[in-house]
């Protein structure tokens, strides 16, 4: 049954956007998701024009919202103000490479745990340790104080609490720390690499260019910890 809306956020990084949009369209079970809301945060490199065409040919109903938010929490707050209470939505950024079956597994955990409010897909270092991209018969979650900005979320969790503070990229973390939310990371991990952390071409050079342009953060503390097999499915 269709019950999930996808929130897809973009700010410049055209090459990442075109790749991750294609993977999302190809790897999402559209029997479970009925709509996409796309936020373009004032892109100037062709991303906005790409997204205008992309929503017109999306596999489900899609809407493009263009603004000048300059803050992921600001986008989240704007989106939540229009979301239905109790609805589950998937928050995806334009550097996240989604694998096949991602939504089926995530939604299955949420349905089995109705009190779970936030379920994260670990795209960072935790998921990179020893995972090979395989699927498993049973998925569950590990409890967490907070998750990252990518995953499945119940809109009700946001409507019942004050807005996320506008403190740049990390306001969402502070907001979760402040309240007693039921949050967790899906386990086993789902292979959903962030393209700005992939140490192979063309992603490595693109990530450097985006950092130089001020569109991405550098990740120096992770440079010596990449696990190349983790990214095998996107080669």
Image: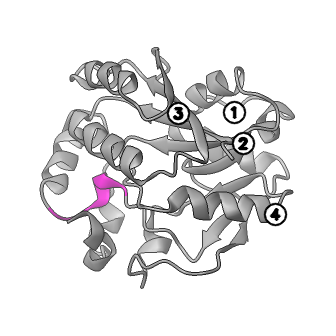
Residue at the limit of the structure toward the top, as seen here: 67
> Given contact means CB atoms under 8 Å apart, are the residues at marks 2 and 1 in contact?
yes
Q: CA distance from mark 1 to mark 3?
A: 10 Å
Residue at numbered disc 2: 175
Residue at numbered disc 3: 72
Mark 2 crowdedness (10 Å alpha carbons): few <14, some 14-19, many ≥20: some
Between marks 4 and 2 in the image, the one whose residue lies nearer the viewer: 4
- x, y percent for residue 113: 81, 63
Residue at numbered disc 4: 113
- x, y percent for residue 154: 75, 44
Q: Residue at x 41, y 74 (%)?
A: 128
Between marks 1 and 4 in the image, the one whose residue lies nearer the viewer: 4
Residue 80 left/right relative to 162: left
Residue at numbered disc 1: 164
Q: Give whichever of discs 3 and 2 has the lower sequence position.
A: 3
Q: Secondary structure at mark 1?
A: loop
- Residue 140's disc is none
The colour scheme of the drawn protein is: one colour
When the figure is inspected, residue 85 is found, relative to residue 82, above or below; the finding is: below
């Amino acid at each position: 049954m269709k019950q999930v809306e996808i929130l897809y956020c973009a700010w410049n990084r055209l090459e990442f956007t075109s790749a991750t949009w294609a993977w999302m369209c190809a790897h999402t079970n559209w029997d479970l998701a009925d709509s996409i809301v796309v936020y373009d945060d004032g892109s100037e490199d062709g991303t906005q024009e790409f997204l205008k065409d992309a929503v017109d040919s999306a596999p489900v109903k899609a809407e493009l919202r263009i603004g000048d938010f300059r803050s992921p929490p600001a986008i989240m707050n704007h989106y939540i103000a229009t979301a239905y209470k109790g609805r589950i939505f998937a928050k995806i950024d334009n550097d996240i490479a989604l694998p096949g079956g991602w939504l089926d597994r995530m939604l299955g955990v949420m349905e089995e745990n109705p009190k779970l409010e936030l379920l994260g897909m670990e795209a960072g270092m935790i998921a990179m340790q020893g995972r090979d991209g395989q699927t498993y018969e049973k998925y569950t979650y590990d409890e967490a104080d907070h998750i990252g900005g990518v995953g499945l979320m119940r809109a009700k969790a946001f409507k019942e609490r004050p807005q996320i503070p506008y403190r740049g990229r990390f306001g969402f973390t502070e907001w979760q720390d402040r309240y007693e939310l039921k949050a967790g990371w899906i386990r086993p991990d789902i292979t959903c690499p962030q393209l700005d952390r992939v140490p192979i071409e063309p992603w490595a050079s693109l990530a450097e260019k985006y950092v130089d342009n001020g569109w991405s953060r550098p990740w120096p503390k992770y440079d010596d910890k990449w696990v190349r097999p983790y990214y095998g499915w996107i080669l």
